[in-house]
């Protein structure tokens, strides 16, 4: 294609884009110039993406000009620069707000800082870490996170209560103050609190006593107590004992040092507890020399045939496991406890929002735990829905795991009554509030109104994108977000991948990143980042490249795990390296997620 033809084609497209922006911009009025620039730039980007520019971009590149593959942040400026290098250069004269590449970078940087705080030397992408309530009593873990590079501490209100949230915040701030006094830390970590939203989760499962598994090491016995006053039988209750066995007797007065207690464990093995001492307060020191599995109700027999029953083992949910071909029953009553298959009744579990099952029809797909368990609706009844499992691996169904129904067209309000109740706590303690399961910009407006009532209109808001509707309405959500003092987007890739299909996740994620860049809106890259490393201490090779790609976002979120400190350190290093080399990106504009209600 000759340059003259290239110029004519590009100018024709740009003229149509310019007209669309000019006709649409007044639907979204803003007073501040920077918001007008972001609005017009986003609209221009969306208008451009209505065209298939694949061939035109390649032709531009072959003539030594910009391919327009990096124009998101400064659409009009980029296109006009290219047009000026083509014959008979001229650009449309309609008055829309334009922004340069440098201005866009500065604007995005300021907006990011307003939400997540000042960046670090060598790394501008912030790191967010999800809190674990275990950290309440682990200030050393929080110290490690702060020193390794955590910028933002995330508390998910879907779990625990205000008591635990307060304790976590207290531990964080106390640790910060101590490090500052020691001269080791000179920052203030931001606190991000997620409102849980209408998250459909698996409900409570019937609790049964655990089996106490005791295993001596080599020739050394396990040292324990038999205790008539103990409230619970426990493993490793303190530094002095490997186990405590609570028994249903009033006294151990008929036992003496040197006696033995005989029992048969849950695996039908004969075992012996050797009595090493008797206490006046109803305790006996005992040694166990062989591995044993002890269940509630196990009988200990003394040398004189006196019987003692072991009681009060800790309880845990029944272990419901399913595999391909199994049927799992989903109950419509959330107070119905989940259970194993029993007396011809299929294994079942309740849901936290049972109304979600009202939209489920035969053949609809059902996903549990971010797709770890998948299946289809086999049948519906007044009290339940039967799900036929199709995922190949045998998996355990656990409590409080997310459930997705991508075919069932669910649109519960993003702000629940619980969210509104928790919001008063959030505005008092958090620096950033996250809204979950957004579908429409009206839900963003509702949160804005709720914040206004609580005198917290200044609080930065992050909208989590995790539904099909949110993808289709993302442009409108971004435009509504410009009405906030500070606004960001989180790509919640777990639920989103299940909703849109794993095969579509790559380009959907790209569309979100591009639209946010066009609106100069900061992005949080979330879900399963360095998950293997955080949980197991060893990273999967693929998750290293995924984490490095997170440098395209303004913040990367890590979930909790036993090795979370190491994960923060590795992520910080990866992001620093990426910042030095930048992420090369040239995109050709073909398929794009159609946006509702813009043009």
Image (cartoon, rainbow, N blue to C red):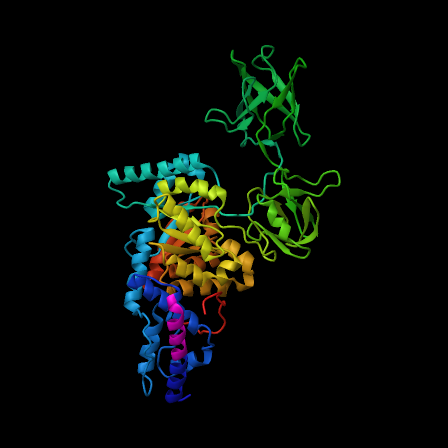
Q: Residue furthest right?
A: 344
What x and y, as percent, mark residue 203? 59, 41
Residue 579 in sight here: yes
Q: As rendered, which of 523 and 286 lies closer to the eye? A: 523
- The answer to whether residue 197 is left or right of residue 41 is right
Q: As rendered, which of 341 and 47 lies closer to the eye? A: 47
> Does the magenta run of residues contain 66?
no
Residues in magenta, as a range = 14-26
What x and y, as percent, mark residue 507? 49, 66
Q: Is residue 249 above or below residue 338?
A: above
Q: Is residue 456 above or below residue 584?
A: above
Residue 585 in sight here: no
What x and y, as percent, mark residue 130? 43, 46
The answer to which quarter of the image holds residue 576 is bottom left
The C terminus lies in quadrant: bottom left
What x and y, as percent, mark residue 30? 33, 62
The N terminus lies in quadrant: bottom left
């Amino acid at each position: 294609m000759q340059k003259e033809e290239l110029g004519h084609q590009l100018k024709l497209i740009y003229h149509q884009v310019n007209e669309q922006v000019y006709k649409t911009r007044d639907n979204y009025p803003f007073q501040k110039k920077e918001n007008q620039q972001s609005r017009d730039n986003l609209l221009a980007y969306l208008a451009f993406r209505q065209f298939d520019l694949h061939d035109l971009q390649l032709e531009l590149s072959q003539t030594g000009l910009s391919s327009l593959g990096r124009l998101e942040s400064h659409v009009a400026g980029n296109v006009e620069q290219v047009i000026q290098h083509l014959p008979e250069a001229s650009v449309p004269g309609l008055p829309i707000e334009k922004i340069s590449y440098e201005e866009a970078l500065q604007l995005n940087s300021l907006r990011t800082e307003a939400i997540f705080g000042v960046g670090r030397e060598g790394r501008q992408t912030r790191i967010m870490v999800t809190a674990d309530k275990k950290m309440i009593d682990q200030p050393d873990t929080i110290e490690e996170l702060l020193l390794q590079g955590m910028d933002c501490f995330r508390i998910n209100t879907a779990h625990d209560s205000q008591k635990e949230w307060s304790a976590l915040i207290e531990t964080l701030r106390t640790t910060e103050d101590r490090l500052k006094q020691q001269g080791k830390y000179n920052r203030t970590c931001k606190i991000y609190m997620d409102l849980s939203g209408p998250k459909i989760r698996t409900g409570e499962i019937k609790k049964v006593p655990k089996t106490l598994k005791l295993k001596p090491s080599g020739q050394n016995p396990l040292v324990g107590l038999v205790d008539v006053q103990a409230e619970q039988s426990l493993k490793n209750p303190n530094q002095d004992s490997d186990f405590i066995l609570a028994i249903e007797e009033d006294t151990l007065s008929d036992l003496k040092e040197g006696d033995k207690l005989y029992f048969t464990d849950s695996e039908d093995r004969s075992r012996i507890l050797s009595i090493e001492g008797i206490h006046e307060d109803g305790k006996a020191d005992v040694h166990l020399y062989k591995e044993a599995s002890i269940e509630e109700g196990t009988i200990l027999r003394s040398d004189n045939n006196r019987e003692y029953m072991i009681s009060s083992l800790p309880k845990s949910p029944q272990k419901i496991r399913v595999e391909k071909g199994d049927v799992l029953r989903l109950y419509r009553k959330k107070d119905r406890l989940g259970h194993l298959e029993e007396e011809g009744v299929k294994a079942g579990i309740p849901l936290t929002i049972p109304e979600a099952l009202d939209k489920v029809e035969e053949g609809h797909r059902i996903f549990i735990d971010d797709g770890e368990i998948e299946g289809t609706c086999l049948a519906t009844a007044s009290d339940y829905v039967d799900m036929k499992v199709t995922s190949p691996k045998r998996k355990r169904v656990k409590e409080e795991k997310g459930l997705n129904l991508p075919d069932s067209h669910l649109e519960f309000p993003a702000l629940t009554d619980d969210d509104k109740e928790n919001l008063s706590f959030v505005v008092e303690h958090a620096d950033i509030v996250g809204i979950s399961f957004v579908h429409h910009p009206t839900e963003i407006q509702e949160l804005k109104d709720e914040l206004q009532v609580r005198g917290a209109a200044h609080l930065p808001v992050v909208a989590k994108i995790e539904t099909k509707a949110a993808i289709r309405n993302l442009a409108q959500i971004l435009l509504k977000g410009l009405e906030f003092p500070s606004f960001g987007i989180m790509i919640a890739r777990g639920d989103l991948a299940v909703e849109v299909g794993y095969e579509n996740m790559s380009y959907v994620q790209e569309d979100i990143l591009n639209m946010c860049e066009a609106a100069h809106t900061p992005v949080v890259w979330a879900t399963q980042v360095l998950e293997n490393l955080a949980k197991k201490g060893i990273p999967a090779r693929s998750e290293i490249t995924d984490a490095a790609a997170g440098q395209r976002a303004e913040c990367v979120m890590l979930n909790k795990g036993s090795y979370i400190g190491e994960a923060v350190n590795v992520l910080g290093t990866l992001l620093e390296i990426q910042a030095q080399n930048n992420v090369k990106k040239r995109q050709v504009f073909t398929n794009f997620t159609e946006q509702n209600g813009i043009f």
